[in-house]
Amino acid sequence: MLSVGRAVWTDGRGDRIFSELSGEPLQTGRRISGTITGGTGRMRGVTGDYELTWRGTLVLRPKARSSRVDRRISVDGFAQPKDRR
C-alpha cells in the first residue's frame, strides 16, 4: 500500500511552500518522499525534493472532526528558488 498526501510549509511571514508526498504507509520509522510543487510570496516558483522519517502519528477525532498530529525526524532535501533575474 502506498501513502500519498500533500504538505504546506509556512514561514514566519506567512509565505508558503506546497508539496506532494508519497511513500510507505504511515507508521513510526517509515520514509516519505516529498516533491515541492510551488509556493507563495517569496517562495513563489520554488522547486525541490525532500525525504523524511515519521516518528509517530496520533489521530484525534473530537466531535466527529478528524485531526492528525504528526511528528517527523531526519528531514533531508534540496530546494531551488526561482531565478528572479
Image (spheres, rainbow, N blue to C red):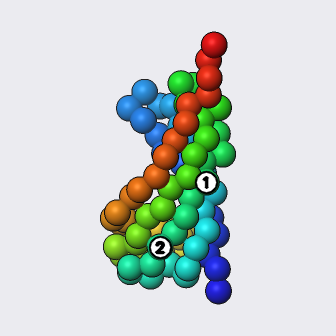
Q: Which of the numbered marks, if any, corresponds to residue 17? A: none
Extreme residue in the bottom direction: 1
Find residue 42 and report its horizontal and vertical position in percent: 53, 24
Density class for disc 2 (Cα within 10 Å; few <14, some 14-19, many ≥20) is many
In the picture, measured across the screen, residue 77 lies left or right of residue 46, that is left
Q: Label 1 vs label 2: CA separation?
A: 14 Å
User: Mark 1 touching mark 2, by CB under 8 A?
Assistant: no
Residue type marked 2: Arg
Position of residue 33 measured from the top left corner of the image (x, y, whole percent): 55, 64
In this rendering, is residue 69 above or below 18? below
User: Is residue 78 shown left or right of residue 56?
Assistant: right
Amino acid on which the number 1 mark rests in the picture: Thr
Query: To which residue does mark 2 refer?
Result: 31
**Which x, y percent locates residue 19?**
60, 51
Who's the residue at 57% across and 25% down the image? Answer: 41
Q: Quadrant of the N terminus?
A: bottom right
Residue at image mark 1:
35
